[in-house]
């Protein structure tokens, strides 16, 4: 499964990738091991983003020291070890209190979801063997379910997209540093 299977079209897209001098199995393990406590930019941006949600009394567990992959606001849809993780769901992220409780949708349901007032968001992490190491890449796609929601989300995206990109780079960097250190320790 890939993002095209879940959300082939989107209004907003970000992509980041990094080559890591370690095999996919090591990169996979380190991606799963990254914790929020090791991601200071993510914690600060997450706290700023979720402060209104916390003030409304929702989502306190999101700011604890969870593994990064467990703290994502959208559920895991597919895992193909050690090649890919795909997350996706419906959100109302631009709403101050986080919006309505999102429906729990599998990949097929999410692809068909058209209820107005929501955005469909998907994100992946891909591990591709390359040049004796691994390219770790991530892509995020967002599609509004109606024109009015797209207009509302556009302003939100203008402000959060730089932070979202910074978070992805921080995660890729954290995985790279840990995976390459593990590889050097194994050789020593």
Image (spheres, rainbow, N blue to C red):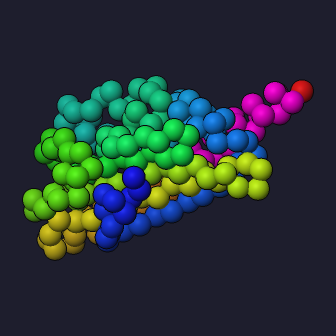
Q: Residue 145 at what x, y percent from top left? A: 17, 65
Compared to residue 97, the image places residue 145 above or below, namely below
Which quadrant is home to the C terminus?
Answer: top right
Q: For this view, does 32 lie left or right of residue 56?
A: right
Q: Residue at x 14, y 69 (%)?
A: 146
Q: Is residue 106 magenta?
A: no
Q: Residue 134 at what x, y percent from top left? A: 68, 49
Figure quadrant of residue 58: top left
Tell me, yes or no, if residue 36 can be seen here.
no
Q: Residue at x 26, y 42 (%)?
A: 52
**For the magenta stretch, what is the residue range?**
166-187
Compared to residue 101, the image places residue 15 above or below, namely below
Figure quadrant of residue 82: top right
Q: Residue 110 at what x, y percent from top left? A: 22, 53
**Which residue is more in the foreground, 4 or 188?**
4
Q: Residue at x 73, y 42 (%)?
A: 22
């Amino acid at each position: 499964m890939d993002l095209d299977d879940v959300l082939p079209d989107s209004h907003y897209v970000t992509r980041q990738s990094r080559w890591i001098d370690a095999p996919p199995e090591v990169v996979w393990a380190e991606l799963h091991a990254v914790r929020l406590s090791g991601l200071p930019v993510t914690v600060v941006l997450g706290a700023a983003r979720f402060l209104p949600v916390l003030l409304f009394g929702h989502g306190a567990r999101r700011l604890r020291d969870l593994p990064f992959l467990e703290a994502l606001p959208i559920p895991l849809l597919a895992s193909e070890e050690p090649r890919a993780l795909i997350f996706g769901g419906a959100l109302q992220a631009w709403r101050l209190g986080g919006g309505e409780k999102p429906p729990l949708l599998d990949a097929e349901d999410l692809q068909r979801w058209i209820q107005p007032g929501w955005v469909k968001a998907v994100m992946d992490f891909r591990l591709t063997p390359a040049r004796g190491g691994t390219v770790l890449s991530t892509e995020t796609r967002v599609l509004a379910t109606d024109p009015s929601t797209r207009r509302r989300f556009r302003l939100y995206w203008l402000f959060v997209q730089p932070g979202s990109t910074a978070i992805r780079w921080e995660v890729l960097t954290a995985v790279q540093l840990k995976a390459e250190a593990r590889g050097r320790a194994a050789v020593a």
